[in-house]
Amino acid sequence: MKITLRYFALWREQLGCEVEIREVAPGTTVNTLIDAVVVNQPQLAALRPATMFMVNQEYAPLSQPLHDGDEVAVIPPVSGGSPTGVRLCKVVDTPLDVREVIQAVSNSASGAVVSFTGTVRDHSLGKEVVALDYEAYPAAAEKMMRQVADEIAERWGIQHFAIIHRVGHLVVGEASVVIAVASAHRHEAFAACEYVIVRLKEIVPIWKKEAYTDGATWIGSEANYPRGHRETQEETALKEENQR
């Protein structure tokens, strides 16, 4: 099937064309199409986390399947909103690439880049964890992430910031969230990264359900906690979450 691609700004300059038509296999998604576009384009691959994509003039997730005759527009970061830095806040349903997130915030004015990767661990609440299911209210989650970006910009003057959170089914060892902060000095970068982790848990509407070898429970819900042990288990869960 044939897909029309439209490029703008840096993407257009790097690829040397504004429009191209590609022949792709049935079942191709936006993600696999862009994989093919950037395979030999390291600069565009680094910019990819801050880039959005439209299918037939509608914003689309990377997982969206394409159909014959579709038009895919590559939308680089626009000039408004955050002209002095990169503020990348996304909820995605695809595996996270830590290197891409770090590259997205790296810049010549920053002497420090601090990142945090949250991964699915194999235990919680004294039980063996086999998987996690993350659910989010994406529009609200990304809005709250942008609020956190505003907070660290005001507090530490940081303008290069990324938080990417994955949703869906994750197995032990997979990354659920990547945070990257770039600043001129390491002290501010470390402090801001820690602040982001705490605020993420406080205000961003993302939930997780832990699956164990003997059942499952939504973390934060008291419904499945045994009577008489509620306080202890809640404190344990909070402590483990803060150490994540």
Image (spheres, helix red, strand yellow):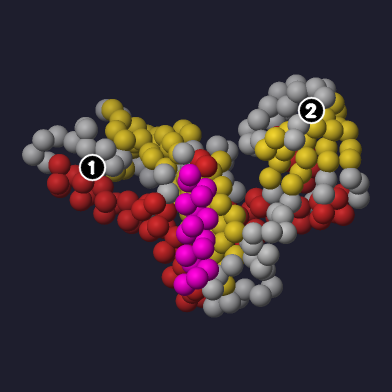
The residue at the far front in this view is 80
Q: Which residues are magenta?
A: 140-155
> Based on the displayed image, in which of its 4 quarters is residue 71 positioned?
top right
Q: Position of residue 115 (x, y in %)?
A: 52, 61
Helix, strand or loop under label 1: loop
Which residue is depicted at the point 82% across and 24% down?
Answer: 69
Task: Say the numbered circle drawn on residue 126.
Answer: 1
Marks counted in the figure total 2
Left or right, residue 106 beside residue 204: right
Which residue is depicted at the point 14% across and 34% down?
Answer: 226
- Say above or below: 191 vs 134: below
State whether the magenta stretch is mostly helix, strand or loop: helix
The residue at which mark 2 appears reads as 70
Q: Give the crowd class for mark 1: few <14, some 14-19, many >=20 residues within 10 Å.
A: few
Q: Position of residue 11 (x, y in %)?
A: 81, 51
Left or right, residue 152 beside residue 26: left
Q: 56 or 7: which is nearer to us?
A: 56
Can residue 47 be seen in this snapshot?
no
Helix, strand or loop under label 2: loop
| Dot 2 or dot 1, earlier in sequence | 2
Identity, as a three-letter code, of the amino acid under mark 2:
Asp
Which residue is depicted at the point 51% across and 63% down?
Answer: 150
220 within the magenta span: no
Q: Give the crowd class for mark 2: few <14, some 14-19, many >=20 residues within 10 Å.
A: some
